Image (spheres, grey):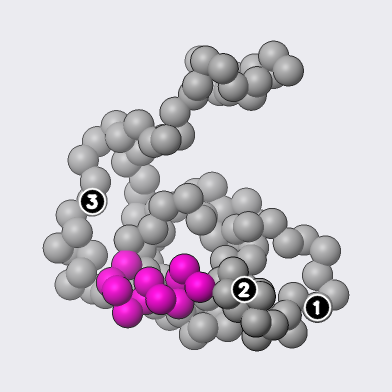
Amino acid sequence: DYDFLHAHPPLSAMAAVGGLWIPSGEDYFGINDRWAVMPRGVADQYFRRWEALADGSLIPQLEGRSDLVPARLLLIHLHAQGIWPAHVHRFLPTAALRCAKSSAYCQVDGRWRNSG
C-alpha cells in the first residue's frame, strides 16, 4: 500500500501528453512496475505481459537472460510493444510504500531494519 505524501500529479496534464506515465525511481534493473498512469489504449499492452509470456511471443526477447526480475520483464515487454522509450514519461513520485509493523524489512528513520 502507498502513503500519499502529496497530491497525485494532475491526470489532465498527463492525458494532454498521452502515453505511459511511471514514477521516477525504484526501477530495479528495469522500470518501476508498482504504479503507472495510462490511457486505455496503452493499458492493453501494459497489462498483457504475462499473456505474452504464456503465448510465447515474448520468449525470443528473453533468451539468454539471467537478470529477469519483474521490473526488467516490464521494460523488455514495453520495448517489444513499441512503447519504450518513445511513449514513456516519468514524474516525481508523490507516494511511498507503507512500512508495516509486521514487516521483517522496513526503512525506519532513514535506516533499513531487518528483524527477520
Q: Label 1 sits on what residue type? A: Glu
> Any magenta on residue 44?
yes
Of helix, strand and loop, which one carries label 1? loop
Q: Which mark is residue 76?
A: 2
What residue did someone put label 1 on?
63
Q: Label 2 sits on what residue type? A: Ile
Q: Residues within 10 Å of mark 1 (few under 14, many from 20)?
A: few
What residue did someone put label 3 on?
9
Answer left or right for 49 relative to 12: right
Q: Residue at x 44, y 28 (%)?
A: 98
Of helix, strand and loop, which one carries label 2? helix
Classify the position of the N terminus by image quarter.
top left
Query: In the figure, 14 relative to 54: above or below?
Result: above
Q: Are marks 2 and 1 in contact (CB under 8 Å)?
A: no
Magenta segment boundaries in residue numbering: 38-48
Based on the displayed image, in which of its 4 quarters is residue 77 positioned?
A: bottom right
Classify the position of the C terminus by image quarter.
top right
Disc nearer the start of the sequence (2/3): 3
